């Protein structure tokens, strides 16, 4: 099969087209003939040598795919050979064939293409796991999404807004802020020209937000603590702005704040299977009804993975960057 491999840690040019044998299936896995794969920040981190695959996972990049089931034990499942599915995988998505744990596969929502289906798993698993399970956004609570036009951002905005929450989102331009608002955010905040903490406090009448989804870290954390409401929760999912933060623990104590963080890739199949069940129950009906829509910025051919990574690193995109494999 054709695949894209990381020849050595470095810039996008280290991604090269290669020939690999088909994956050997392990217990609980199925083989998918890949039609599309998503490009995500963890792929870039892996390419740079900062995010190694878990033990036993493919060394090829790619954490989400969509395509046709062509092999594997499907007994007791909802699927049959020939079915089109999307799946969250630990690696190997940039290829013509990929092994995927059966319990991490979902049907492509009715009305969506394979490319749209492949854009869903990484962001929907991540957002659901962190926003709704880990920090339990609920009731009339408010949410601040950092990086509102990223793949994670457009998913978090749409899901939270669909469930009736007030959502605020940061982005790097006025154009991107307007897109956040079109997706359901009450206010897009241009972090280059505005103080997001001050804007959030003003919009909430001084209370602050109940939940923040942060992929920046670094010096954002201290400012985020300042704009959390009492009993507020900060969910950190990436550290694009750095791994060090100087924070006021007195505020954390006095206002009963929760700071938590997680990565999804190393979690167990059982953990991810539980998220699958919740997505099928709560999120997939919204996708099939058109209340939430995949946001695809650009699609590249598999052999153009270098260009896809260059675009990802430019941060010019709004929504998902995809690879069309077959």
Image: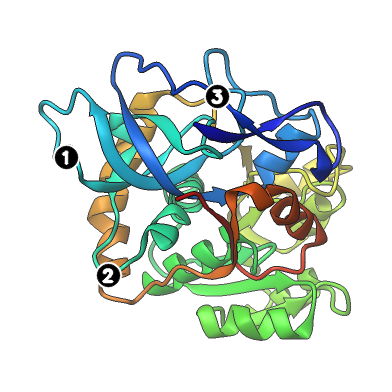
Mark 2 and mark 3 lie on one chain; the one further toward the N terminus is 3
Q: Which residue is mark 1?
A: 79
Q: Is residue 269 left or right of residue 72?
A: right
Residues 107 and 200: in front is: 107
Label 1 SS: loop
Label whose residue precedes the other's in the sequence (3 or 1): 3
Q: Is 139 located above or below residue 128 in the figure?
A: below
Give 150 or 307, whichever is nearer the viewer. 307
The Cα atoms of the two marked residues, 1 and 2, are separated by: 18 Å
Query: In the figure, residue 188 lies in which quadrant?
Result: bottom right
Near-viewer residue (294 or 139) = 294
How far across and how far down the image is residue 85, in percent? 30, 47
Q: Could you give the CA–CA distance between mark 2 and mark 3, rounded to whole angstroms? A: 33 Å
Q: Residue at x 35, y 18 (%)?
A: 25
Nearest to viewer (mark 3 / mark 1): 3
Mark 1 surroundings: few (<14), some (14-19) or many (≥20) residues within 10 A = some
- In this view, the residue farthest toward the left is 76
Residue 127 appears in view: yes
Disc on res. 20: 3
Q: CA distance from mark 3 to mark 1?
A: 27 Å
Q: Which residue is mark 2?
A: 111
What residue is drawn where x is 73% and y is 72%?
171
């Amino acid at each position: 099969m054709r695949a894209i491999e990381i020849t050595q840690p470095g810039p996008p040019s280290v991604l090269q087209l290669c020939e690999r044998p088909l994956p050997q299936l392990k217990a609980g896995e199925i083989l998918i003939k890949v039609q599309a794969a998503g490009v995500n920040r963890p792929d870039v981190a892996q390419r740079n040598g900062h995010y190694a695959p878990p033990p036993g996972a493919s060394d090829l990049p790619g954490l989400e795919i969509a395509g046709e089931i062509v092999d594997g034990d499907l007994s007791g499942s909802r699927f049959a050979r020939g079915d089109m599915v999307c799946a969250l995988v630990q690696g190997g998505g940039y290829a013509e064939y990929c092994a995927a744990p059966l319990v991490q596969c979902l049907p492509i929502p009715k009305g969506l293409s394979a490319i749209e289906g492949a854009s869903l798993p990484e962001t929907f698993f991540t957002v659901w796991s962190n926003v709704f399970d880990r920090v339990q956004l609920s009731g009339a609570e408010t949410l601040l999404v950092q990086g509102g036009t990223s793949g994670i951002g457009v998913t978090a905005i749409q899901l939270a807004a669909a469930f009736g929450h007030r959502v605020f989102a940061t982005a790097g331009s006025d154009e991107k802020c307007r897109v956040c608002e079109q997706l359901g955010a009450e206010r897009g905040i241009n972090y280059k020209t505005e103080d997001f903490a001050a804007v959030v406090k003003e919009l909430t009448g001084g209370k602050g937000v109940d939940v923040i989804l942060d992929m920046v870290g670094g010096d954002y954390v201290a400012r985020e603590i300042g704009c959390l409401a009492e009993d507020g929760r900060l969910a950190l999912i990436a550290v694009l702005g750095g791994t060090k933060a100087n924070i006021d623990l007195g505020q954390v104590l006095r206002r009963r704040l929760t700071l938590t963080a997680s990565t999804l890739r190393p979690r167990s199949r059982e953990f991810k299977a539980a998220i699958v069940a919740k997505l099928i129950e709560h999120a997939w009906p919204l996708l099939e009804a058109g209340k939430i829509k995949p946001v695809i910025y650009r699609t590249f051919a598999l052999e153009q993975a270098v260009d896809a990574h260059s675009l990802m690193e430019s941060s010019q995109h709004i929504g998902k960057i995809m690879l069309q494999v077959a």
